[in-house]
Amino acid sequence: MYLWLVFVQFITQFTIREYSMRALGWLKSVGLITAASIAAFPFIFYSKIAQSQSSVSVHLTMGNPSNAIINSNYPTNYLLVKPQYALSYNNNTRIPNWVSWQLNSSWLGSTPRQDDFRRDTTLPSTWYGVSGSDYTGSGFDRGHMTPSADRTNTVSSNSSTFLMTNMIPQAPDNNQGPWANLENYSRTLVSQGKELYVVSGSYGTCGTGSNGSKCSFNGITVPARTWKVIVVLDNPGSGAGGVTTLTRVIAIDMPNSQGIRSIPWQNYRTTVDSIEQKTGYNLLSSVASSTQTVIEAKVDNQ
């Protein structure tokens, strides 16, 4: 299984076009495909890559934004796959690069918040494990990426969200203001029968918390910005193949600072393209490229 995960992550580091063209050249040279097959090949190949990502984890249905890999030789882009979410961890910054998760009605229930902030013992043993107490006195919240309230179906699901690999230092006004309001809105969409695929993270350095501006504390980088992308599927279970040019995609990019608690999350809407440009990630890589071109350039207005 490990070798298969490595293969999937390796092959997705190359563009679909590059691999398609190489393969087409070889197939044409040995006369194995017809002209009609040539036209269809890139789409077939693309579909296989999307299936490979989702087979690694349902939370990677829309893709692996940074081609993170389960290999401790890649400490700044280390893939952690949990039953409740998937993430790319950065051992240099001691926060996740991004966290990705599926959200539908099956993940929601009546389990109370566990509040058991703790080290993630699944990290390589030689790495520093951030603990909940490392944030004490910093002026920043232990800010969930996958929210506690998105995992209320079981105690173990909710507890998983309190692992510190799921946290970034968030300014209280960011975390408890527009960020929390967007989380609540997301669950409202699920109550309407939607299925969401969410990826969130941060970029930049230095944010402003309740104790003023900081760039780091206890070796933990404080990001300057927080971002989130939400793919809203009207037909749960349709996966990346169900994303069309009409699919709603919400992208937000907000400052990790005080003074924004009362600002509506809608004020921070942007494009997926903009977030990708600032982070270097390919956020919806399992979606057909022609569809990506359209939906990633739009600013949500609903």
Image (spheres, rainbow, N blue to C red):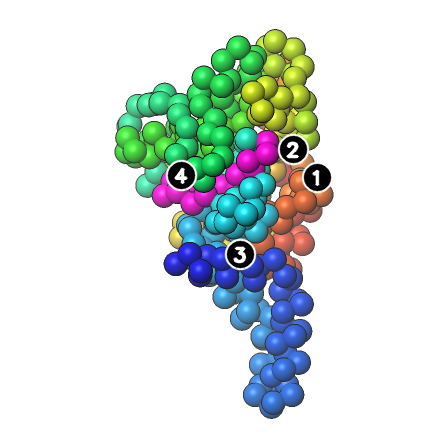
Could you say which disc has been placed on residue 9 in the image?
3
For badge 2, the amino acid type reads Tyr
Other-residue count near label 3 (Cα within 10 Å), few / some / many at <14 / 14–19 / ≥20: many
Residues at marks 4 and 3, CA–CA distance in whole angstroms: 20 Å
Q: Which tag, 4 or 2, sits closer to the chain's start? A: 4
Tell me residue 273's x, y (percent): 69, 45
Residue at 59 percent across and 48 percent down: it is 66
Residues at marks 4 and 1, CA–CA distance in whole angstroms: 29 Å
Find disc 4 in the rendering and name its residue: 122
The secondary structure type at the circle numbered 2 is strand
Q: Is residue 15 magenta?
A: no
Question: Taking 111 as reference, is 20 left or right?
Answer: right
Find disc 2 in the rendering and name its residue: 203
For badge 1, the amino acid type reads Lys
Q: Eyeballing the image, is 283 above or below 180? A: below
In this view of the protein, which residue sits in the foreground, 118 or 30? Answer: 118
For badge 3, the amino acid type reads Gln
For badge 4, the amino acid type reads Thr
- Disc 4 and disc 1 in contact, CB within 8 angstroms: no
Could you say which disc has been placed on residue 278 in the image?
1
In this view of the protein, which residue sits in the foreground, 273 or 128? Answer: 128
- Disc 3 and disc 1 in contact, CB within 8 angstroms: no
Write down the region rendered in magenta: 80-93
- Disc 1 and disc 2 in contact, CB within 8 angstroms: yes
